[in-house]
Image: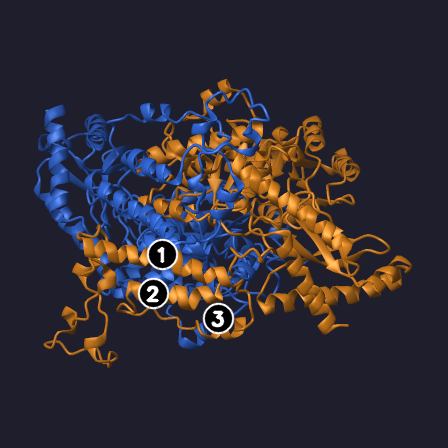
Chain colours: A blue, B orange
Amino acid sequence: MLPAYCAFKKIKFHYDSPSKPMNKKNTMTPKKELVADWPALTRTFIRPENEAARSTLIKYMEQILFGLHDFLKTHVGFTEEISLKDLADRFTDSLISQNPEKKLADVITDLIEDIAPHAVNVASPYFVGHMTSAIPFFMVHLKTIVAALNQNVVKIETSKVVSVVEKRVLAKIHRLIYRKNDAFYNEHIQSTDTTLGCFTENGTLSNLTALWVARNTRFSPTNGFDGVEKEGLRAAYQAYGIERSVVLVSKRGHYSLNKAGGLLGIGNQNIVAVDVDEKNRIDLIALEKTIKALTKSPEKTAIWAIVGIAGTTETGSVDPLSKLGEICDRNRIHFHVDAAWGGPTLMSEKYSHLLSGIELADSVTIDGHKQFYMPMSCGMVYFKDPTIMDNVIYHANYVNRPGSVDLGIKSPSGSREANSLILDSALKIMGSRGYGLLIDHGIETARKFADEIDKRPDLQIITPPELNILTYRLCPFDLQEKLAGSDAEQAFSINEKLNDINRRIQRLQREAGNSFVSRTTLKAKHPTEQDIVVLRVVIMNPMTTIEILREIIDEQENIYKNTFA
Amino acid sequence: MLPAYCAFKKIKFHYDSPSKPMNKKNTMTPKKELVADWPALTRTFIRPENEAARSTLIKYMEQILFGLHDFLKTHVGFTEEISLKDLADRFTDSLISQNPEKKLADVITDLIEDIAPHAVNVASPYFVGHMTSAIPFFMVHLKTIVAALNQNVVKIETSKVVSVVEKRVLAKIHRLIYRKNDAFYNEHIQSTDTTLGCFTENGTLSNLTALWVARNTRFSPTNGFDGVEKEGLRAAYQAYGIERSVVLVSKRGHYSLNKAGGLLGIGNQNIVAVDVDEKNRIDLIALEKTIKALTKSPEKTAIWAIVGIAGTTETGSVDPLSKLGEICDRNRIHFHVDAAWGGPTLMSEKYSHLLSGIELADSVTIDGHKQFYMPMSCGMVYFKDPTIMDNVIYHANYVNRPGSVDLGIKSPSGSREANSLILDSALKIMGSRGYGLLIDHGIETARKFADEIDKRPDLQIITPPELNILTYRLCPFDLQEKLAGSDAEQAFSINEKLNDINRRIQRLQREAGNSFVSRTTLKAKHPTEQDIVVLRVVIMNPMTTIEILREIIDEQENIYKNTFA
């Protein structure tokens, strides 16, 4: 017998007893219904008490691990075989059933047979459109451990050693970025007063946290002013004699920075987008001009952060971090680096130099669920100065007491799962070299892919890979030649046509369900300012080979021939 | 053979080959070292290819499910057997090793044998100090499925059906709260234009989201003003002719509301704490007075939200929600209910009336990892008006496109795991009645416990349970009598002594490691204003019986006798 709630016996529940008439709504025969039953329910909270029960639970886990894997191996899954509309029509019941609808075994079977086939197989090596990929299967084991332990790392009283482990892994990644000496880490790794960084849900919240800290540092308490966190932005502007405050980032900045500007009350129009050079890196001359224009005294504008990007979402470009660091230092501006994507490149012995200058950052965002190959979702943010998070301290009577190891004291989050345990374990299992090999594969495969695209007359590279992301478009050779000799008006019209072609190719390929490439829109400057629709490939899955990438562009060329030519 | 990275062969890595001298730092014999190895690494990304490999993986999962459970069954774990300081001293290595340190099997063994014993056994029925408890073990299975699917619900292209399932479960919980009719849910459940709520990491971020939406609704675009999200708070105050804006909540409000005030730029001092009545509910007369005082015209203050609490963190009290709703409606103020804790009470047939009036709220926070018994961590926020989240819309070129089902369009988060799949499945497995039984057990056991405390002369109830939380303190009978006849000064001194006693009892009990009760500080008004240290019990574990609770207070009385008497 199962010791589980999933084993709801098919018996009458006490309030269904013959002496009591059944609720009129329940007209189905009670015999076949599942009913909520206290003894069965409580058994779901304890461990299985005999071998039969154990093996049933293990059978379920086997179903999950392999039933799911077997299915996922076979398809990409973003197919229109069932349209999203038809799918949505199947999920329109808005009532929670009173009694159990299904047993656990049936729920798992449904998830594997009915949900998984319509989910997206992000693990497929043909799924190269987004920053979500296959993960090593031991990550699933580690996530299971985190769930089974169910620690809440907001406070030591619900996590104890896990908070200590979290502080260690924060130090390890901090050291990867900042390479301070042993004395520094000995002092701070387990200090209850200082903080090297924090875990968040994702890069968006990491960027928010970095800017929150930066805002509060800029508008810290001063003569008669208790600081922006306490008194708010209006009082802060008055105290500091300004009328506007801004953050600067290149046009390739992630949209989460705008969201942070909105949330933090400075207004998202004050996240000022600076032009990029031809390599999609922030244009340093434009940046210096912007700084100069904004700090003219009558304007009364404070620039309190500049964001450099280490791996832009759309093109994988890396801003000139050393130079940005120098500019920030010279102007006394908080320097944040959004390395949500590119951060783990630091573990590559061959390519870590691409991020050179990141150690100058006052704060750095890195995502665990991206190139640390952790399961969704895990963000992190690191700070050069271990005391700077003092600007976002919160205490409460029952938790987060001053001087404790309670990690919730300096964090945008409250209750939080112990994803740090996954990263700590993964670093041990992989070693930095293991991660480095994955980074190398991505960068080198992207370069080979760019060469392959270059060889094909009807494809055109738009942004060559700097890390492991590139964009290109289908642009038939005759149109490429035409474009070269066009004036602005003609070029505009040809590009509009190409935009339409590439939008449709991306959609048709996705709907065919064999592979998935994403699309985005970049701005062309010559011969005229214009949105260019491009196909975007992100190479992070170690199973994605150049052969697979060739198949993917073969398919795109075929779609073009069959649809447009 | 294991098809896994965990199976790192003990072979020399190519750059350790004899032709190349080893790095001088690596002086250990290479034979015994684990090395990063590409073929082994890539195998960790695919499914196991033979039966032997499968059974090894299953063996690990068995180790996790039962090794961990067997251990957790036996102790609470917040013990000072190893002090936190000694524990911290063991986790001070800040370097990521280059090559793998351990195999997966050894990492799992370490987690079970070395980490778990020093984690906190929140699953123990003797762990009654916090809002973290045992979870049904099928939750661990469901979390494993979420990890194995690894969908990113920020966008449809990395989640497809899972986004559709998420919209359905949002509708189910929305209906539990707001009980709108079929037509309403048919219109909105799968609408791409409207939103009934969103998942967040936790209650803290749900409260932030609710207040973010409320702030933006209050300072929405108007004549020549593009709205606070775009232009910021300074411009908003100018456009609306005010100098200050505030949110009102009782003194029992969660600290996340202050944090939200700080983050959102209004300043946390503008989260104004209103007095509570003797039942720890917001004092409505004090509230009306505060509203009147703040809206006197020369003050130029906007009150843009009032927060009601359905289950305060410290005392489990429920504010008079119907009356708060009426006051908000009359004053045209956004009404937010923080039901992070109490929300699931709505599933109890006996006690749902305790939350009556919650349907008047413009927004409601509920936590999945609290009384939905989901694994850490899952917050949610719901909105009465399905269009109100339009005030926090963000788009990007490559994601969150207008008119799509991309759930990231209206959310504080970016990448996000599909915890909605866990809740959707759990509702099917449990039924609302299953959850209702858990709620009933908590409330009824808390009442029995209060009766038991009342019977004991040396214990004193401070806040009787309204839901399933109560506070009390050890207060020897003779001191209780003394207190009754004391003047303010004498009472102050006796209470100080009692505070010390209760602080020490809580600590000593925790250190003994058999059970865990938390402590917090409440404000006494009579005979003098004073902080009172109380012991706090949260009853959510169905295995926590009145017999266990008696043991817990027996132990406290014994600690008192042995230490102080």
Question: Please, is residue A447 above or below residue A128 in the view?
Answer: below
Q: Position of residue A510 (x, y in %)?
A: 22, 33
Would residue B419 be found to the left or right of residue B42 on screen? right
Quadrant for the C terminus of chain B, please: bottom right
Q: Nearer the viewer, residue A55 or A453?
A: A55
Have a look at marks 2 and 3 and say if they share a chain.
no
Q: Which of marks 1 and 3 is nearer the N terminus?
A: 1
Q: What residue type is labelled 1?
A: Leu
Q: Mark 3 points at which residue?
A: A188
| Distance of label 2 from label 3 (alpha carbons) | 25 Å
As helix, strand or loop, the secondary structure at mark 3 comes to: helix
Q: Which amino acid does label 2 sit on?
A: Val
Q: Position of residue A381 (x, y in %)?
A: 43, 56
Q: Quadrant of residue A124?
A: top left
Residue at 23 percent across and 36 percent down: it is: A534
Would residue A536 be found to the left or right of residue A24 on screen? left
As helix, strand or loop, the secondary structure at mark 1 comes to: helix
Q: Quadrant of residue A504?
A: top left
As helix, strand or loop, the secondary structure at mark 2 comes to: helix
Q: Which amino acid does label 3 sit on?
A: His
Is the C-beta separation of discs 1 and 3 under 8 Å?
A: no
Q: Disc 1 sits on a residue from what chain?
A: A
Callout 2 environment at 10 Å: few (<14), some (14 to 19), or many (20+)? many
Residue at 61 percent across and 46 percent down: it is: B257
Question: Please, is residue B66 above or below residue B465 in the view?
Answer: below
| Distance of label 1 from label 3 (alpha carbons) | 27 Å
Q: Name the residue under label 2.
A: B107
Q: Disc 3 sits on a residue from what chain?
A: A
